[in-house]
Amino acid sequence: MGKAGSHKKKILIIAVVIGIFVVCAWGCAPRMNEALADPREDNPPGFTYTWSASSDCSVCHRSEGLSMEDTHRLAGFHAEEEGLTCITCHEDSPGLAKAHNNVAMGEANVKRLKNTEVSDTVCLSCHSLAELATVLPESVYLVDEHGTRVNPHAVPATEGHDGVNNCSSCHETHTLSSAVELSYKNCTSCHHHEVFECGSCHN
């Protein structure tokens, strides 16, 4: 083999060695795996944490966290316009601490409150129910089958309305649900013949 052939052989061997080195280095280099991108997966199985007001709720409550970035949803709108955070509305710190007691990181995404609630006092600390009743356009009033119109912010404070006429009964902050549709469903869950006036059905 001539000098040129020997030189080519050396270059080929060097190229192969460099190629093997690059492949090994790339394969062994630390990099973010999609499964490890979730902070919940960084902890050993059974790892639990202690909830605090400064916790990042979106780590487990993913859909709610995303809703805080969407101004078409009440949560996102309030976050953008007023700078509200999760703890602004979910202010029941003792209840939240209890609800998260012994919760393991990596558990299924929770979608509904079970042990705590957002009270009307939170909403009414900024909003006036009387003012809302005044400014609500008649086009979005509740209307039953007889044409009876009801202002959802001025529903009679009767015994039957206790516990069902809350702000959260009609306004879902983390979804795109229509308050008009939810309010009608809320009313017709009891007014099952879709008649709002008392005595229309039960004489």
Image: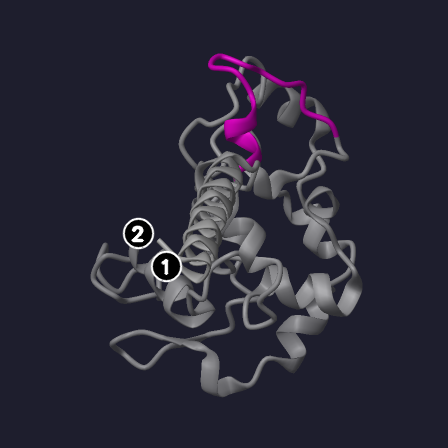
Left or right of 55? Residue 14 is left
Looking at the image, residue 99 lies above or below residue 38 = above
- What amino acid type is highlighted by mark number 1? Cys
Q: Residue at x 73, y 50 (%)?
A: 85
User: Mostly what secondary structure, the magenta segment?
Assistant: loop
Q: Are marks 1 and 2 in contact (CB under 8 Å)?
A: yes
Identify the image quadrant of the C terminus.
bottom left
Q: Any magenta on residue 49?
A: yes
Q: Horizontal and vertical percent for residue 197?
A: 35, 66
Instruction: Find the distance from the CA under tag 1 to the CA under tag 2.
Output: 6 Å
Q: Residue at x 27, y 78 (%)?
A: 146
Q: Which residues are magenta?
A: 38-52
Q: Residue at x 46, y 87 (%)?
A: 139
Q: Horizontal and vertical percent for residue 196?
A: 34, 65
Looking at the image, residue 95 lies above or below residue 161 = above
- What amino acid type is highlighted by mark number 2? Cys
Q: Is residue 47 visible?
A: yes
Looking at the image, residue 34 lies above or below residue 100 = below
> Observer-nearest residue: 2 or 68?
2
Q: Secondary structure at mark 2?
A: loop
> Observer-nearest residue: 11 or 53?
11
Residue bearing mark 2: 190
Circle on res. 187:
1
Left or right of 77? Residue 19 is left
Q: Any magenta on residue 167?
A: no
Q: Residues within 10 Å of mark 1 (few under 14, many from 20)?
A: many
> Observer-nearest residue: 83 or 23?
23
Circle on res. 92:
none
Q: Secondary structure at mark 1?
A: helix
